[in-house]
Each structure stands twice: as structure tokens, then as C-alpha cells.
Image (spheres, helix red, strand yellow):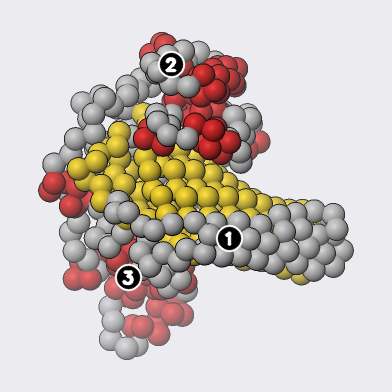
């Protein structure tokens, strides 16, 4: 596959002054990407999502990350948090607010690389290597920025760590490749929010990789809120390594983007490791949102619970591929998986593929998927209480999403998602009075 000339040139550029170990990894990532190119639908993992069109597009790279305060205020979450802000992949110190917290460090990747080289070298690619996908190889080759987060042993953070990635409506589209490295110390507890927001009309490519290491008895609530513009490409890979007695909760909330792909893998590597995967995606017009998840039960007495919900309108298309793998001798495992989808249009499509792969014999597992339209009996019941039909349909759609939204533990996030979902419903649902205009 031929690649754009500017991308080929950039793959072989090495930032001046960077350590040799990082340059070597860049070269390996570039070589891998040049070999495989952007994925096509001929590959099983990309059967429903064709990224080959990217090979015909030119993306530059932002040199500065300026953004006026009004636009920043409109896009950010208004929460009390330790905050790092990146604009088109460039760190913006003025918009960030990362106070010193005892036992915790939250550092932009570029600054972390000026410090303990050995520590960063050990962690990068520890979980997500260049072989995982063409996009992780591309990220390794081109990453310039991101975040390095260390939560010390026994630390319990009262406020979230908030990483905000803003994509601007540039004269020419740009690409960015954030790399996020997280280490949770033993018996620590924290909340991490990854927020990807885009200005209307932005047509950039964001390709993020997040690697999370959880030491014994640590707890992490991870929120990913994706609100890219409907002209953007968004690809993200998240991989988690869970030790004994850890608890990881993922809230994967996808509301924007033209073409979106999320890969989420968690490895339950010791007893009593628990993961909850919660997902909500809403597509309209011609949006394409693809969620791939994989839970690896590599040890006995490990537990997983997954619930993904999709709402699709217009000619939107959704993909859900969830896989639960139980290793031989990983006995007394509990693994549950559910995917439910609501189609608001006859032209909307969903491809769903829940999978169980079990090699142990003493386990309790189930999986299921449903796809349908709104319940006419429920609509009739609401109409009998004086609610007009279209508003009844809107309220029932919100209720469908509520099973995931009610698990969100931050009011600001809940409000943002609820208003976004309601705001994306067709005008005929008459929910204007419930929604504030948050568009730029």
C-alpha cells in the first residue's frame, strides 16, 4: 500500500537530542508500519472498519498548541481536577492546572523524557507493542507528547486526574499520537479521565495509546469521553495489567468522530482481580464507531462484567466485538458480557460479535446481545400518561442509555453525557427544553 509522501518523510524524522533507545523504537515502529500500512477490511480484526482511506489523506503536525480561553471553556469539563491540556497533541502549560500532590506525579511525556530515562524506557511498550496493530506501530514511531502518571503506594486521590486533548479546526488537518503511561501503586485509589474534544469542522487524526499497570490491591476508575467532531478520525488503544485484588472500571463513552476505533484489553493476571467494562456509543448521520474489547482471565478466581450499549440513528454504523478468554487452569472465574443496541433509523447498522473462549471447566460465564427498536408497549404506556409520542420515544432512548450513565460517579460527566445524548436525538423527539446548546 502506498503511503502519503509527507507521512513517509515524517516516519524517518528523529527529534533532535532524544535518547537513542527512543530513536531505536521509533525506527522499529516506522519499519513495522511501512510493512503493514493502514488496515483494510481484508484483515479479520478490521473486517467491519476500513481505515485504508487514510492512506490517501495528508496530515500535517501541529507546531503550537494555542487556544483562546472561550473555546477552551466551551470544550473542557468543569471539574475540580489535576489537569493537563493538549491542543492538537501539543502540551499547553497555560491551560493546564496540575498542582503538586504528595505521592503522585502527573507529567507531560516530553518533560518526563528530560528526567529518568530508564524509568520511561522500562514502561513504554511494556503492555502495548508495535505488533499489536498498525496504529500502535504508528504511535510508537511518531509520538511526541502524552502523559506519565505515577500514583504512589497507598495514595487515595480525592480529585480526578484529567487529561484533555483538544482538536482544532485547522486550515489543514493534523495528526497527533498521544502516549499515556500510568502506574498505580499498591493499595492506591484514583480516577483518570481521558477527554478527547474537537471543534466543529475539525478533520484531524488522533491516534492514542494508553498503558496502565496496576499493583496489588489498587483501584482505578477510568473514563474515556470522546467528543471529536464528525469529520475526525479517532483511534485509541488501552491495555491494562491487573495484579492481585485490583479493581479496574472502564467507562468508554463515544459521542463523536467520523470514524472511531477503540481497542481495550485487560489482563487479569492474579487472583481476585476484577474488571467492569461499561460502554456507551451514539452515532448519527454517517458516523462509524467500532469498539473491540478483550478480557483475559489468566488466573483463577478473577471476575469480569461487561455492558456495552449502542444507539444509532441516520446511516450510522456501529461495531461491537467483545471477547472473554479464560486460560486453562483459571478456575472459579466469573465472566459476564452484554451488548444491547438501539436502532432509531431503518438505515442504521450494527455488527456485533460477543465471544467466549474457555479452556477451564469450573467457571460461570454468559454473554448476550440484542438489537432492536423502541418498545411500542412502553411508548403506549407513556402516552397514556399524557406524554406525546415523540417525546415518549426520546425519553425511552435516554432511559436505554441510563443503565450505563447511572454508573458514572461524577455529576459533571453525567450531565455532559446526558445532554450530549439528548442533544443528538432527532428534533422530532421534542427534547429541546431538556438540552442546552453547547455547540461552538
- First in sequence: mark 1 or mark 2? 2
Which residue is at the front of the view, 65 or 83? Answer: 83
Q: Which residue is disc 2 drawn over?
A: 14
Residue drawn at point x = 34 percent, y = 88 percent: 384
Q: Where is residue 234 in the image (x, y as percent from the top left)?
A: 41, 39
- First in sequence: mark 3 or mark 2? 2
Q: In this rendering, is residue 7 above or below 411?
A: above
The Cα–Cα distance between marks 3 and 2, rounded to whole angstroms, is 43 Å
Q: Is residue 282 visible?
A: no
The Cα–Cα distance between marks 1 and 2, rounded to whole angstroms, is 37 Å
- First in sequence: mark 3 or mark 1? 1
Give yes or no for contact between labels 1 and 2 (Cβ–Cβ under 8 Å).
Answer: no
Left or right: where 78 falls relative to 148:
left
Q: Which of marks 3 and 2 is in front?
A: 2
Left or right: where 74 falls relative to 319:
left
Asked where in the image residue 9 lies, by quadrant, the reply is top left
Which residue is at the front of the view, 396 or 245? Answer: 245
Q: Can residue 21 be seen in this view?
A: yes
Residue drawn at point x = 47 percent, y = 55 percent: 151
State the SS at label 1: loop
Q: Which residue is disc 1 drawn over?
A: 186
Amino acid at each position: 500500500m502506498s503511503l502519503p509522501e509527507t507521512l513517509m518523510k515524517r516516519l524517518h524524522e528523529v527529534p533532535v537530542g532524544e535518547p537513542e533507545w527512543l530513536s531505536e523504537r521509533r525506527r522499529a515502529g516506522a519499519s513495522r508500519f511501512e510493512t503493514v500500512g493502514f488496515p483494510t477490511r481484508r484483515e479479520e480484526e478490521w473486517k467491519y472498519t476500513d481505515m485504508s482511506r487514510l492512506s490517501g489523506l495528508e496530515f500535517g503536525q501541529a507546531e503550537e498548541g494555542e487556544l483562546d480561553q472561550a473555546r477552551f471553556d466551551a470544550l473542557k469539563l468543569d471539574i475540580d481536577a489535576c489537569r493537563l491540556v493538549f491542543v492538537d497533541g501539543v502540551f499547553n502549560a497555560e491551560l493546564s492546572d496540575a498542582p503538586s500532590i504528595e505521592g503522585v506525579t502527573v507529567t507531560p511525556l516530553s518533560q518526563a523524557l528530560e528526567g529518568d530515562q530508564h524509568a520511561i524506557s522500562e514502561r513504554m511498550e511494556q503492555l502495548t507493542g508495535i505488533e499489536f496493530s498498525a496504529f500502535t506501530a504508528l504511535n510508537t514511531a511518531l509520538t511526541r507528547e502524552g502523559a506519565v502518571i505515577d500514583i504512589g503506594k497507598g495514595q487515595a486521590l480525592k480529585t480526578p486526574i484529567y487529561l484533555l486533548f483538544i482538536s482544532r479546526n485547522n486550515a489543514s488537518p493534523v495528526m497527533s499520537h498521544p502516549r499515556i503511561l500510568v502506574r498505580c501503586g499498591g493499595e492506591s485509589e484514583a480516577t483518570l479521565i481521558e477527554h478527547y474534544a474537537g471543534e466543529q469542522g475539525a478533520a484531524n487524526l488522533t491516534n492514542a495509546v494508553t498503558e496502565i499497570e496496576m499493583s496489588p490491591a489498587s483501584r482505578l476508575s477510568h473514563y474515556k469521553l470522546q467528543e471529536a467532531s464528525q469529520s475526525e478520525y479517532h483511534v485509541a488503544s488501552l491495555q491494562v495489567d491487573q495484579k492481585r485484588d485490583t479493581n479496574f472500571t472502564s467507562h468508554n463513552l463515544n459521542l463523536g468522530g467520523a470514524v472511531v476505533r477503540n481497542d481495550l484489553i485487560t489482563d487479569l493476571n492474579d487472583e481476585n482481580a476484577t474488571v467492569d467494562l461499561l460502554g456507551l456509543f451514539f452515532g448519527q448521520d454517517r458516523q462509524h464507531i467500532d469498539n473491540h474489547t478483550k478480557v483475559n482471565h489468566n488466573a483463577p478466581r478473577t471476575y469480569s462484567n461487561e455492558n456495552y450499549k449502542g444507539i444509532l440513528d441516520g446511516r450510522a454504523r456501529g461495531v461491537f466485538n467483545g471477547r472473554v478468554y479464560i486460560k486453562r487452569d483459571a478456575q472459579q472465574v466469573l465472566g459476564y458480557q452484554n451488548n444491547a443496541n438501539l436502532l432509531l433509523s431503518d438505515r442504521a447498522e450494527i455488527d456485533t460479535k460477543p465471544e467466549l473462549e474457555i479452556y477451564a471447566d469450573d467457571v460461570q460465564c454468559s454473554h448476550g446481545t440484542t438489537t432492536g427498536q423502541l418498545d411500542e408497549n412502553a411508548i403506549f404506556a407513556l402516552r397514556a400518561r399524557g406524554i406525546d409520542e415523540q417525546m415518549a420515544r426520546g425519553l425511552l432512548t435516554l432511559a436505554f442509555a441510563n443503565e450505563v450513565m447511572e454508573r458514572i460517579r461524577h455529576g459533571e460527566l453525567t450531565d455532559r453525557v446526558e445532554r450530549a445524548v439528548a442533544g443528538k436525538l432527532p428534533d422530532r423527539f421534542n427534547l429541546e427544553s431538556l438540552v442546552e446548546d453547547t455547540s461552538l
